[in-house]
Amino acid sequence: MATAPLRWGIMGTGNIARKFAQGLGQGNARLELVAVGSRHADSAAAFAREFGPHVRAHASYQALLEDDQVEVVYVSLLNHLHAEWSVKALARGKHVLCEKPATMTARELEGVLATARANRVFFMEGFLYRCHPRWARLRELIADGAIGTLRLLQASFCFDGGGRADGRLLTLAYGGGALMDVGCYPISWLRWMAGAEPVATSCSAHIGETGVDEWSGGQLLFPDGVLGSFVASIRVAAPPGAALHGSRGWIEVTEPYRCTPGSSAFIVHPQDGPPRTVVVEDDGTTRYTREALEVADHIADLQSPVMTWADSLGQARTLDALRHQAGVRWPGEPEE
Ligand SMILES: NC(=O)c1ccc[n+]([C@@H]2O[C@H](COP(=O)([O-])OP(=O)(O)OC[C@H]3O[C@@H](n4cnc5c(N)ncnc54)[C@H](OP(=O)(O)O)[C@@H]3O)[C@@H](O)[C@H]2O)c1
Protein backbone atom coordinates (compact mmCIF):
# COMPACT_ATOMS: atom_id res chain seq x y z
CA MET A 1 0.00 0.00 0.00
CA ALA A 2 1.42 3.39 -1.00
CA THR A 3 1.92 5.79 1.90
CA ALA A 4 1.17 9.49 1.58
CA PRO A 5 4.25 11.63 0.93
CA LEU A 6 5.83 13.47 3.85
CA ARG A 7 4.84 17.13 3.47
CA TRP A 8 7.76 19.54 3.86
CA GLY A 9 7.91 23.25 4.59
CA ILE A 10 11.20 25.07 4.05
CA MET A 11 12.12 27.93 6.38
CA GLY A 12 14.37 30.42 4.59
CA THR A 13 15.12 30.91 0.90
CA GLY A 14 18.94 30.93 0.89
CA ASN A 15 21.60 28.83 -0.76
CA ILE A 16 21.05 25.54 1.04
CA ALA A 17 17.25 25.91 1.09
CA ARG A 18 17.30 25.94 -2.71
CA LYS A 19 19.49 22.81 -2.87
CA PHE A 20 17.24 21.00 -0.42
CA ALA A 21 14.14 21.97 -2.41
CA GLN A 22 15.80 20.52 -5.52
CA GLY A 23 16.40 17.31 -3.55
CA LEU A 24 12.73 17.15 -2.57
CA GLY A 25 11.74 17.77 -6.18
CA GLN A 26 13.56 14.83 -7.68
CA GLY A 27 10.47 12.73 -8.10
CA ASN A 28 10.60 10.62 -4.97
CA ALA A 29 6.97 9.75 -4.24
CA ARG A 30 7.60 9.73 -0.47
CA LEU A 31 8.56 13.43 -0.35
CA GLU A 32 6.65 16.57 -1.20
CA LEU A 33 7.49 20.27 -0.85
CA VAL A 34 4.26 22.05 0.09
CA ALA A 35 5.33 25.45 1.45
CA VAL A 36 8.15 27.93 2.00
CA GLY A 37 8.50 30.77 4.50
CA SER A 38 10.72 33.82 4.25
CA ARG A 39 11.13 37.20 5.96
CA HIS A 40 10.28 38.69 2.57
CA ALA A 41 7.03 37.97 0.70
CA ASP A 42 8.73 38.38 -2.68
CA SER A 43 11.52 35.90 -1.84
CA ALA A 44 8.96 33.36 -0.68
CA ALA A 45 6.86 33.89 -3.82
CA ALA A 46 9.85 33.57 -6.18
CA PHE A 47 11.05 30.42 -4.39
CA ALA A 48 7.57 28.87 -4.50
CA ARG A 49 7.24 29.66 -8.23
CA GLU A 50 10.57 28.00 -8.90
CA PHE A 51 9.54 24.75 -7.21
CA GLY A 52 6.03 24.25 -8.49
CA PRO A 53 2.55 25.74 -8.67
CA HIS A 54 1.33 23.82 -5.60
CA VAL A 55 4.03 25.29 -3.26
CA ARG A 56 2.52 27.90 -0.93
CA ALA A 57 4.54 31.05 -0.16
CA HIS A 58 4.45 32.50 3.37
CA ALA A 59 5.71 35.99 4.15
CA SER A 60 7.05 35.03 7.59
CA TYR A 61 8.53 32.02 9.34
CA GLN A 62 5.62 32.06 11.80
CA ALA A 63 3.11 31.83 8.94
CA LEU A 64 4.91 28.73 7.67
CA LEU A 65 4.47 27.14 11.11
CA GLU A 66 0.77 27.96 11.03
CA ASP A 67 0.30 26.10 7.74
CA ASP A 68 -1.55 22.92 8.67
CA GLN A 69 -0.37 21.17 5.52
CA VAL A 70 3.26 21.30 6.71
CA GLU A 71 4.28 18.18 8.64
CA VAL A 72 8.03 18.70 8.80
CA VAL A 73 10.04 21.92 8.71
CA TYR A 74 13.51 22.21 7.24
CA VAL A 75 15.24 25.02 9.18
CA SER A 76 17.82 26.44 6.77
CA LEU A 77 18.40 29.77 8.51
CA LEU A 78 21.62 31.30 9.80
CA ASN A 79 23.09 29.51 12.82
CA HIS A 80 21.94 32.01 15.46
CA LEU A 81 18.30 31.42 14.44
CA HIS A 82 18.34 27.61 14.54
CA ALA A 83 17.37 27.19 18.20
CA GLU A 84 14.63 29.82 18.24
CA TRP A 85 12.86 28.50 15.14
CA SER A 86 13.39 24.83 15.88
CA VAL A 87 11.79 25.33 19.30
CA LYS A 88 8.86 27.27 17.78
CA ALA A 89 8.30 24.58 15.14
CA LEU A 90 8.58 21.67 17.59
CA ALA A 91 6.29 23.40 20.10
CA ARG A 92 3.70 23.65 17.34
CA GLY A 93 3.93 19.92 16.76
CA LYS A 94 6.01 20.07 13.56
CA HIS A 95 8.87 17.65 12.99
CA VAL A 96 12.20 19.40 12.33
CA LEU A 97 15.29 18.83 10.25
CA CYS A 98 17.66 21.67 11.21
CA GLU A 99 20.83 22.55 9.35
CA LYS A 100 24.17 22.01 11.06
CA PRO A 101 25.35 23.12 13.55
CA ALA A 102 22.06 22.48 15.36
CA THR A 103 22.44 25.45 17.71
CA MET A 104 24.98 28.05 18.88
CA THR A 105 25.60 26.24 22.19
CA ALA A 106 24.86 22.95 23.95
CA ARG A 107 22.56 24.78 26.35
CA GLU A 108 20.42 25.95 23.44
CA LEU A 109 20.29 22.40 22.10
CA GLU A 110 19.11 21.09 25.47
CA GLY A 111 16.09 23.40 25.10
CA VAL A 112 15.42 22.20 21.55
CA LEU A 113 15.57 18.54 22.55
CA ALA A 114 13.38 19.09 25.61
CA THR A 115 10.75 20.64 23.32
CA ALA A 116 10.96 17.73 20.85
CA ARG A 117 10.63 15.26 23.72
CA ALA A 118 7.70 17.09 25.33
CA ASN A 119 5.79 17.31 22.03
CA ARG A 120 6.76 13.83 20.80
CA VAL A 121 8.07 15.12 17.48
CA PHE A 122 11.10 14.27 15.37
CA PHE A 123 14.29 16.36 15.44
CA MET A 124 17.49 15.82 13.48
CA GLU A 125 20.61 17.92 12.93
CA GLY A 126 21.33 18.06 9.21
CA PHE A 127 24.66 16.30 8.86
CA LEU A 128 23.74 14.72 5.57
CA TYR A 129 27.07 12.90 5.14
CA ARG A 130 25.88 10.55 7.91
CA CYS A 131 22.99 9.33 5.75
CA HIS A 132 25.26 7.76 3.12
CA PRO A 133 25.49 3.94 3.06
CA ARG A 134 29.27 3.83 2.60
CA TRP A 135 30.03 4.29 6.30
CA ALA A 136 28.70 0.82 7.09
CA ARG A 137 31.28 -0.59 4.65
CA LEU A 138 34.05 1.41 6.32
CA ARG A 139 33.08 0.02 9.72
CA GLU A 140 33.18 -3.51 8.27
CA LEU A 141 36.70 -2.92 6.97
CA ILE A 142 37.86 -1.79 10.39
CA ALA A 143 36.05 -4.63 12.20
CA ASP A 144 37.68 -7.09 9.76
CA GLY A 145 41.09 -5.82 10.87
CA ALA A 146 42.06 -4.11 7.59
CA ILE A 147 44.32 -1.70 9.50
CA GLY A 148 44.73 -3.48 12.84
CA THR A 149 43.81 -1.56 15.98
CA LEU A 150 42.49 1.95 15.35
CA ARG A 151 44.81 4.56 16.91
CA LEU A 152 44.72 7.90 15.09
CA LEU A 153 42.03 9.76 13.14
CA GLN A 154 42.58 12.82 10.96
CA ALA A 155 39.98 14.99 9.29
CA SER A 156 39.90 18.38 7.64
CA PHE A 157 37.43 20.71 5.95
CA CYS A 158 38.74 23.97 4.53
CA PHE A 159 37.59 26.32 1.80
CA ASP A 160 38.04 29.97 0.96
CA GLY A 161 34.69 31.63 1.57
CA GLY A 162 35.98 35.08 0.57
CA GLY A 163 36.33 38.04 2.88
CA ARG A 164 32.83 39.56 3.10
CA ALA A 165 32.91 40.95 6.63
CA ASP A 166 29.09 41.21 6.80
CA GLY A 167 28.42 37.72 5.42
CA ARG A 168 27.29 34.78 7.53
CA LEU A 169 30.78 33.21 7.66
CA LEU A 170 32.55 36.17 9.27
CA THR A 171 29.78 37.57 11.47
CA LEU A 172 30.14 36.56 15.11
CA ALA A 173 26.50 37.26 15.99
CA TYR A 174 25.35 34.90 13.20
CA GLY A 175 27.45 32.04 14.59
CA GLY A 176 30.15 32.46 11.98
CA GLY A 177 33.68 31.07 11.95
CA ALA A 178 35.50 27.98 10.75
CA LEU A 179 34.55 25.70 13.65
CA MET A 180 30.84 26.38 13.24
CA ASP A 181 30.68 26.37 9.46
CA VAL A 182 32.98 23.56 8.40
CA GLY A 183 34.91 22.39 11.48
CA CYS A 184 31.70 20.84 12.77
CA TYR A 185 32.02 18.19 10.00
CA PRO A 186 35.44 16.76 10.91
CA ILE A 187 34.58 17.05 14.61
CA SER A 188 31.35 15.14 14.05
CA TRP A 189 33.17 12.54 11.94
CA LEU A 190 35.98 12.02 14.49
CA ARG A 191 33.45 11.47 17.29
CA TRP A 192 31.41 9.11 15.12
CA MET A 193 34.37 7.02 14.02
CA ALA A 194 35.71 6.86 17.59
CA GLY A 195 32.25 5.84 18.78
CA ALA A 196 32.60 7.88 21.96
CA GLU A 197 32.76 11.39 23.38
CA PRO A 198 36.23 12.86 23.89
CA VAL A 199 37.74 12.85 27.39
CA ALA A 200 40.04 15.75 26.51
CA THR A 201 40.02 18.42 23.80
CA SER A 202 42.33 21.20 22.65
CA CYS A 203 41.95 23.83 19.99
CA SER A 204 43.96 26.77 18.65
CA ALA A 205 42.78 29.25 16.06
CA HIS A 206 43.55 32.39 14.14
CA ILE A 207 40.91 34.92 15.13
CA GLY A 208 40.23 37.47 12.40
CA GLU A 209 39.18 41.11 12.60
CA THR A 210 35.50 40.29 13.01
CA GLY A 211 36.16 38.05 16.03
CA VAL A 212 35.49 34.67 14.41
CA ASP A 213 38.02 31.85 14.02
CA GLU A 214 39.15 31.92 10.38
CA TRP A 215 41.32 28.82 10.66
CA SER A 216 41.40 26.37 13.53
CA GLY A 217 43.00 23.12 14.49
CA GLY A 218 42.71 20.82 17.43
CA GLN A 219 42.66 17.39 18.97
CA LEU A 220 40.13 15.07 20.60
CA LEU A 221 41.34 12.27 22.87
CA PHE A 222 38.87 9.38 23.22
CA PRO A 223 38.53 6.99 26.20
CA ASP A 224 40.28 4.03 24.55
CA GLY A 225 43.29 6.17 23.59
CA VAL A 226 42.23 6.91 20.01
CA LEU A 227 43.41 10.42 19.15
CA GLY A 228 41.60 12.54 16.56
CA SER A 229 43.02 15.68 14.93
CA PHE A 230 41.25 18.20 12.77
CA VAL A 231 41.83 21.41 10.83
CA ALA A 232 39.11 23.68 9.49
CA SER A 233 39.05 27.00 7.68
CA ILE A 234 36.82 29.44 5.86
CA ARG A 235 39.85 31.29 4.39
CA VAL A 236 42.05 28.45 3.06
CA ALA A 237 41.66 26.75 -0.32
CA ALA A 238 42.35 23.07 0.37
CA PRO A 239 40.49 19.83 -0.36
CA PRO A 240 38.60 18.15 2.48
CA GLY A 241 40.06 14.88 3.70
CA ALA A 242 39.80 12.17 6.29
CA ALA A 243 41.92 9.18 7.28
CA LEU A 244 41.98 6.42 9.87
CA HIS A 245 45.36 5.12 11.05
CA GLY A 246 45.75 1.78 12.78
CA SER A 247 48.49 -0.43 14.14
CA ARG A 248 48.84 -2.20 10.74
CA GLY A 249 47.96 0.38 8.09
CA TRP A 250 45.68 3.24 7.21
CA ILE A 251 42.53 4.08 5.24
CA GLU A 252 42.09 7.21 3.18
CA VAL A 253 38.50 8.44 2.77
CA THR A 254 38.01 10.33 -0.46
CA GLU A 255 35.46 13.19 -0.43
CA PRO A 256 34.37 12.47 3.15
CA TYR A 257 31.41 14.86 3.34
CA ARG A 258 30.19 15.41 -0.22
CA CYS A 259 28.35 12.10 -0.79
CA THR A 260 28.47 12.23 -4.58
CA PRO A 261 25.78 9.86 -5.85
CA GLY A 262 26.82 6.69 -7.69
CA SER A 263 29.98 5.39 -6.11
CA SER A 264 32.55 6.38 -3.52
CA ALA A 265 35.85 4.93 -2.48
CA PHE A 266 38.18 4.19 0.37
CA ILE A 267 41.86 3.52 -0.26
CA VAL A 268 43.20 0.91 2.14
CA HIS A 269 46.97 1.03 2.72
CA PRO A 270 47.96 -2.13 4.59
CA GLN A 271 51.33 -2.14 6.35
CA ASP A 272 52.50 -5.21 4.43
CA GLY A 273 50.99 -4.91 0.96
CA PRO A 274 50.05 -2.60 -1.90
CA PRO A 275 47.20 -0.11 -1.52
CA ARG A 276 43.78 -1.28 -2.69
CA THR A 277 40.71 0.78 -3.56
CA VAL A 278 37.40 -0.31 -2.07
CA VAL A 279 34.51 1.07 -4.13
CA VAL A 280 31.08 1.36 -2.53
CA GLU A 281 28.21 1.54 -5.02
CA ASP A 282 25.03 3.28 -3.98
CA ASP A 283 21.63 3.63 -5.63
CA GLY A 284 22.40 7.07 -7.09
CA THR A 285 20.09 8.97 -4.76
CA THR A 286 21.32 12.55 -4.40
CA ARG A 287 22.39 13.76 -0.99
CA TYR A 288 19.48 16.03 -0.03
CA THR A 289 16.93 13.48 -1.21
CA ARG A 290 18.75 10.85 0.83
CA GLU A 291 18.69 13.08 3.91
CA ALA A 292 14.97 13.81 3.52
CA LEU A 293 14.30 10.07 3.14
CA GLU A 294 16.27 9.43 6.35
CA VAL A 295 13.81 11.74 8.11
CA ALA A 296 10.83 9.99 6.48
CA ASP A 297 12.17 6.56 7.48
CA HIS A 298 12.57 7.44 11.17
CA ILE A 299 9.95 10.09 11.82
CA ALA A 300 7.92 7.76 14.04
CA ASP A 301 11.04 7.05 16.17
CA LEU A 302 11.52 10.83 16.79
CA GLN A 303 15.23 10.55 15.97
CA SER A 304 17.46 9.02 13.33
CA PRO A 305 19.95 6.30 14.28
CA VAL A 306 22.67 8.02 12.23
CA MET A 307 22.22 11.38 14.00
CA THR A 308 20.67 10.77 17.41
CA TRP A 309 19.79 13.47 19.95
CA ALA A 310 22.56 12.23 22.25
CA ASP A 311 25.03 12.46 19.38
CA SER A 312 24.01 16.05 18.57
CA LEU A 313 24.31 16.97 22.23
CA GLY A 314 27.79 15.42 22.44
CA GLN A 315 28.70 17.34 19.30
CA ALA A 316 27.39 20.64 20.71
CA ARG A 317 29.29 20.14 23.99
CA THR A 318 32.48 19.36 22.10
CA LEU A 319 31.99 22.39 19.82
CA ASP A 320 31.45 24.63 22.88
CA ALA A 321 34.67 23.36 24.46
CA LEU A 322 36.75 23.73 21.29
CA ARG A 323 35.34 27.18 20.52
CA HIS A 324 36.14 28.41 24.01
CA GLN A 325 39.65 26.95 23.80
CA ALA A 326 40.04 28.79 20.48
CA GLY A 327 39.09 32.02 22.26
CA VAL A 328 35.70 32.61 20.60
CA ARG A 329 32.64 33.64 22.65
CA TRP A 330 29.28 34.71 21.29
CA PRO A 331 28.12 38.27 21.97
CA GLY A 332 26.78 38.22 25.54
CA GLU A 333 27.96 34.66 26.22
CA PRO A 334 29.21 34.55 29.81
CA GLU A 335 32.75 33.49 30.72
CA GLU A 336 32.66 30.28 32.75
N1 LIG B 1 24.39 20.94 4.72
C1 LIG B 1 25.19 21.66 3.97
O1 LIG B 1 25.86 21.15 3.08
C2 LIG B 1 25.26 23.14 4.21
C3 LIG B 1 25.92 23.92 3.30
C4 LIG B 1 25.92 25.29 3.50
C5 LIG B 1 25.29 25.81 4.61
N2 LIG B 1 24.68 25.01 5.51
C6 LIG B 1 24.00 25.55 6.70
O2 LIG B 1 22.75 26.09 6.25
C7 LIG B 1 22.44 27.29 6.95
C8 LIG B 1 22.20 28.39 5.96
O3 LIG B 1 23.32 28.53 5.12
P1 LIG B 1 23.15 29.17 3.64
O4 LIG B 1 24.44 28.98 2.96
O5 LIG B 1 21.93 28.66 2.98
O6 LIG B 1 22.96 30.71 4.04
P2 LIG B 1 22.22 31.85 3.22
O7 LIG B 1 22.26 31.57 1.76
O8 LIG B 1 22.78 33.14 3.71
O9 LIG B 1 20.70 31.70 3.69
C9 LIG B 1 20.31 31.88 5.01
C10 LIG B 1 18.86 32.30 5.08
O10 LIG B 1 18.58 32.70 6.44
C11 LIG B 1 17.55 33.68 6.43
N3 LIG B 1 17.92 34.81 7.31
C12 LIG B 1 17.30 35.14 8.45
N4 LIG B 1 17.85 36.20 9.02
C13 LIG B 1 18.87 36.59 8.22
C14 LIG B 1 19.80 37.64 8.26
N5 LIG B 1 19.84 38.51 9.29
N6 LIG B 1 20.69 37.73 7.28
C15 LIG B 1 20.69 36.86 6.26
N7 LIG B 1 19.83 35.84 6.15
C16 LIG B 1 18.91 35.68 7.13
C17 LIG B 1 17.37 34.14 5.00
O11 LIG B 1 16.14 33.60 4.53
P3 LIG B 1 14.92 34.56 4.09
O12 LIG B 1 15.54 35.78 3.47
O13 LIG B 1 14.17 33.76 3.13
O14 LIG B 1 14.16 34.87 5.33
C18 LIG B 1 18.53 33.54 4.24
O15 LIG B 1 18.19 33.22 2.95
C19 LIG B 1 23.60 27.52 7.92
O16 LIG B 1 23.25 27.02 9.19
C20 LIG B 1 24.74 26.68 7.36
O17 LIG B 1 25.62 26.20 8.36
C21 LIG B 1 24.64 23.68 5.31
Image (cartoon, helix red, strand yellow):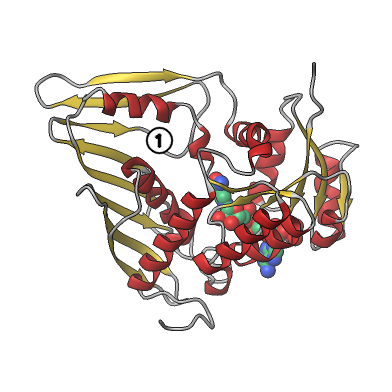
Q: Position of residue 276 (x, y in %)?
A: 24, 19
Most extreme residue toward the left is: 272
Quarter that holds the C terminus: bottom left
Q: Residue at x 35, y 28 (%)?
A: 138
Q: Whole-percent x and y of residue 216?
A: 34, 62
Q: Please give the residue where the numbered disc 1 appears in the rendered image.
A: 255
Q: Residue at x 34, y 29 (%)?
A: 139
Residue 85 versus residue 204: which sits nearer the camera?
85
Residue type at the position of mark 1 = Glu
Mark 1 residue crowding within 10 angstroms, few (<14) / some (14–19) / many (20+): some
Image region (quadrant) for ligand 1 = bottom right
Instruction: Classify the position of the N terminus by image quarter.
Output: top right
Res 12 seen here = no
Left or right: residue 306 compared with residue 326: right
The residue that appears at 69% across and 61% down in the rendered structure is: 87
Residue 211, compared with residue 253, is above or below; it is below
Ligand 1 has an atom within 8 Å of the beta carbon of the residue at disc 1: no
| Up/down of 132 relative to 21, above or below | above
- Quadrant housing residue 209: bottom left
In the picture provided, is 270 more to the left or to the right than 124? left
Query: In the figure, 10 relative to 292: above or below?
Result: below
User: Residue 92: which quarter of the image?
Assistant: bottom right
Q: Position of residue 201 (x, y in %)?
A: 29, 62
Q: Nearer the viewer, residue 248 or 214?
A: 248
Is residue 106 visible in the rendered image? The answer is: yes
In-image side of 255 versus 66 (left or right): left
Q: How many marks?
A: 1
Residue situated in front as seen by the camera: 63 or 112: 112
**Nearest to the observer: residue 111 or residue 12:** 111
